[in-house]
Image (tube, rainbow, N blue to C red):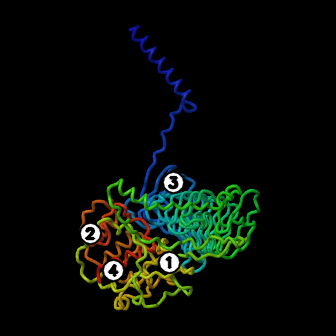
Amino acid sequence: MKKMLSLLLVFALLLSTSTSAFAADGTEGGEQPQESEQQTTVTVATLDELQTAVAAAENGDTIALSAEIKLDGVPLETEKDITLVRADTYESGSFLRLKNGAVLSGFTMENYKSSTTVVCESSAKIEDCCFVGDSDSSETFIKLYALSTSNVVSISDCSFSGAAYSAISSKNNVQLTITDCTFRDNRSYTQGGAIRSEGTLILEGCTIENNYAISGGGVYCSGNLTITDCQFSGNQIESEKFGTDILSQGTLSLTDDPQDGAGYFEESTGTKIELPMSEYTGTAKLIWLTDEQAAEYFAPVEPEEPEEEPSPDDTENDEQDNGETPTEPPTTPSEPPNDDNGDDTPDDQQPPSEPQETPNDDDNADIPDDGKQDETDEDDNEPVIIYEPVYIRVPVYVEPEPVEPSFVCGDAVIDVSRSVVLEGYDDGLLHLEDGLTRAQFMTILYRLLDEETIERYETTDTVFADVAPDAWYCPYVNTIANAGIVCGTGNGNFDPDALLTWGHIITILSRFVEAQEYQLQNIQYDGWAADAIETAVAMGWITDHAAFNPDAAISRGELAYFVNYVLGLYR
């Protein structure tokens, strides 16, 4: 019995010691440490559901949106760490649509699909938000429109990373002020890797670095642009020295004071801009550099010495050594016209002290200045064979199956005797490597329809919410949609400013023929355009080429060649 009592006393002592040690190492007063917060995800489809989910959320929670949610004059704000994502069942369409003074604040928004994250139809305020995407596929994070009157939007203390078609896109009649925001690793297949604006754009205290575009690697603006105390670095462009950091083709003001040893340089001349600069009108292609960097960046390029031609004796010796008869090298398609727009300054001229005017690179370059389409008869023009896509040029040509001489989608008929004829820009060049928007392609497709189709389906009725009645492309988009050829991107939208991809063009053209099945061997793709791609390969439009990427933007030259090639099969 005494032995048993002794054991119990020892056990009680050990338990007391263990409890004291836990109290010393744990929380004050010996309380149990709290378990780590569990991240949860809820799915919502309405504003009421979203507001309820935000109120109930804990730090680290995720809310999935299964439909576009409209904020009409109401705020959506949080101080918690909450992430908004797209629900698995919500393939396309924006997260939020803001108007009439709506406020969005405090959220992280992750969007890895090719659809806009936030659309602003009128005045709105966005602050303290983080936008994250995938620069290979994500759409523009924020699109701003002015469907009726002017639109005033402010964006502050936000970060943007991973957009594929400019982080922010702002249309005409929009006054956009962006303050203390960061733009990193965004890209555009036209202009403005970080920001693209056609209206009034005011940038204050922003960091814009490591973005990419064809031109205007950081910022592109064709309206009124004012920049104050912003930092540019690491931006890149495909068109050499054509606005690595800034491409302005409207009115530009730089309000900074002069800085010793650094500043903005005009890329076409190498001239350092005198600050402050107020309301410069014309084209400005700017890069921010230190004076040492500028000296290296604008240093004359040493011409390469031409390779010496082999003498006839050397050629004969080579033939004898190889024991073979040399063959003619294969011919290759001619290169597209040079698109550098003549930026080189002749040796006998001093570089101008102000930026010089260069061609307009606006998306609507195919549209005359009065906003109306050219009404010349396309039948009088020869087909334009100008830029052969790699997906057609292959080592072995496969004869396509015979096709019926018709190209019909329901009752809509394409006149296969017609051809795509690109209209040049104001500089007289075709800009073959520029992309096309979905709206621009609707104009091209409209011109290919026969007269009976146009008479039957032409309409002025508004079909899509994001196609304004006074937009230059409105009658063409409405007619094509009324004919049942296109149905938009979901939720009543068309997304007219999104770049046309290979998947888009093949899907639309495949609706004019009977669907075909084909077992693809090299194209690795199982997305929404898979059936159309099988049809295209089976019909001989493209080859089963491993380099084919349906999500890649199609250039102006590629589109003209491809569509004319396809129509030629049906003549």
Query: Which sits earlier in the primary sequence, circle 1 or circle 2?
Result: 2
Q: Is residue 248 left or right of residue 438?
A: right
Q: Is residue 135 left or right of residue 170?
A: left
CA distance for labels 2 and 4:
17 Å
CA distance for labels 3 and 1:
47 Å
Callout 4: few (<14), some (14-19), or many (20+) C-alpha neighbours within 10 Å? Answer: many
User: Along the line of sight, which residue is nearer the eye, 409 or 6?
Assistant: 409
The residue indicated by pointer 4 is 567
Query: Which sits earlier in the primary sequence, circle 4 or circle 3?
Result: 3
Query: Which sits earlier in the primary sequence, circle 2 or circle 3?
Result: 3
Mark 3 touching mark 1, by CB under 8 A?
no
Query: Which sits earlier in the primary sequence, circle 2 or circle 4?
Result: 2
Mark 2 touching mark 3, by CB under 8 A?
no
The answer to whether one can see residue 5 in this image is: yes
Say which amino acid is labelled 2.
Answer: Val
- Of badges 2 and 3, the one in the foreground is 2
Mark 2 touching mark 4, by CB under 8 A?
no
Say which amino acid is labelled 3.
Answer: Ile
The residue indicated by pointer 1 is 430
Q: Is residue 146 left or right of residue 557?
A: right
Q: Which mark identifies residue 82?
A: 3
Say which amino acid is labelled 1.
Answer: Leu
In the displayed structure, 227 sits above or below 107; it is below
The residue indicated by pointer 2 is 398
Pinpoint residue 275: horizontal percent, then vertical percent: 75, 66
User: Along the line of sight, which residue is nearer the eye, 234 or 122?
Assistant: 234
- Of badges 4 and 3, the one in the foreground is 4
Query: Which sits earlier in the primary sequence, circle 1 or circle 4?
Result: 1
In the displayed structure, 181 sits above or below 417; it is above
CA distance for labels 4 and 3:
51 Å
